[in-house]
Amino acid sequence: MPFDLITGKFIPEKSNIWRDCVDGYYDWTKEHIAEGAPLNEADHCGDPPLLLAAGNGHLACVKLLVNEGADLEQRGMMKETPLSRAAHNGHFHTVKYLIEEGAELDPLDLGDNTPMHWAAMRGHVEIVKYLLESGADKTLKNKQERLPIDNCQACWSNSWRYVRELLADD
């Protein structure tokens, strides 16, 4: 990325579809698609474009990729989906959009964690509530035999108590 000596700022430049999805550069992502960039292929780290855009909360890029035919269930190296990554990082509007578009609610990653496990661990109250309202299963255990409620701990988030209340049995 070039550096402008006068302003003291870095100047973004078009890179590749993966980098531009990470950074949320909608126009450049659109150009990459028009140029035939692969929508479902992973980058050198194993992450496909939709996973990168969703994980960074770039909703406009997510919508563009989905509308252009990107697979909602594409997986990264750890087998997480765009929904899992968005839930993990607290991007509510991206989570909502992916679910509205038909993303699987309870996909399992390599550790058998679901988006609910990740959102609960990180204390994302609104996302946990929306996942529950959408029908996600709060009773699935991961490979460590932990339920999403077991991930609600003070060491992970200050809002763990609120998430725990949502996940507690009625």
Image (cartoon, helix red, strand yellow):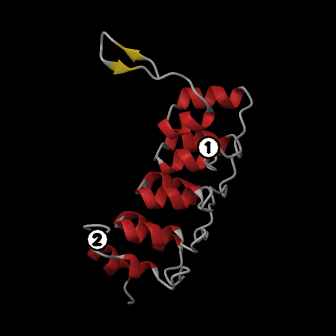
Q: Which mark is residue 138?
A: none
Residue at the (52%, 49%) spot, across then down:
54
Q: Is residue 3 above or below residue 45?
A: above
Identify the residue at the far top of this view. Answer: 6
Residue 168 makes an appearance in the image: yes
User: Residue 76, image x and y in percent?
Assistant: 62, 55
Q: Are marks 1 and 2 in contact (CB under 8 Å)?
A: no
Indicate the amino acid at tag 2: Cys
Q: Would you call the spot at circle 2 few (<14 residues within 10 Å), some (14-19), or many (20 or more)?
A: few
Residue 129 makes an appearance in the image: no
User: Residue 85, image x and y in percent?
Assistant: 51, 57
Residue 112, image quadrant: bottom right
User: Residue 127, image x and y in percent?
Assistant: 42, 64
SS for dot 2: loop
Indicate the amino acid at tag 1: Pro
Residue at the (40%, 57%) spot, across then down:
90
Question: How far apart in space, not on screen, are marks 1 and 2 (Cα)?
Answer: 31 Å
Q: Quadrant of the C terminus?
A: bottom left
- Horizontally, is 154 left or right of 52 in the view? left
Q: Is residue 39 above or below residue 159?
A: above
Q: Is residue 131 above or below residue 90?
A: below
- Horizontally, is 100 left or right of 162 in the view? right
- Sequence-wise, which precedes: disc 1 or disc 2? 1
SS for dot 1: helix
Residue at the (37%, 65%) spot, across then down:
122
User: Residue 149, image x and y in percent?
Assistant: 40, 81
Residue hosting label 2: 155
Q: Is residue 16 above or below residue 96?
A: above
Residue hosting label 1: 49
Identify the residue at the far bottom of this view. Answer: 170
Q: Would you call the spot at circle 1 few (<14 residues within 10 Å), some (14-19), or many (20 or more)?
A: many
- Horizontally, is 20 left or right of 34 in the view? left
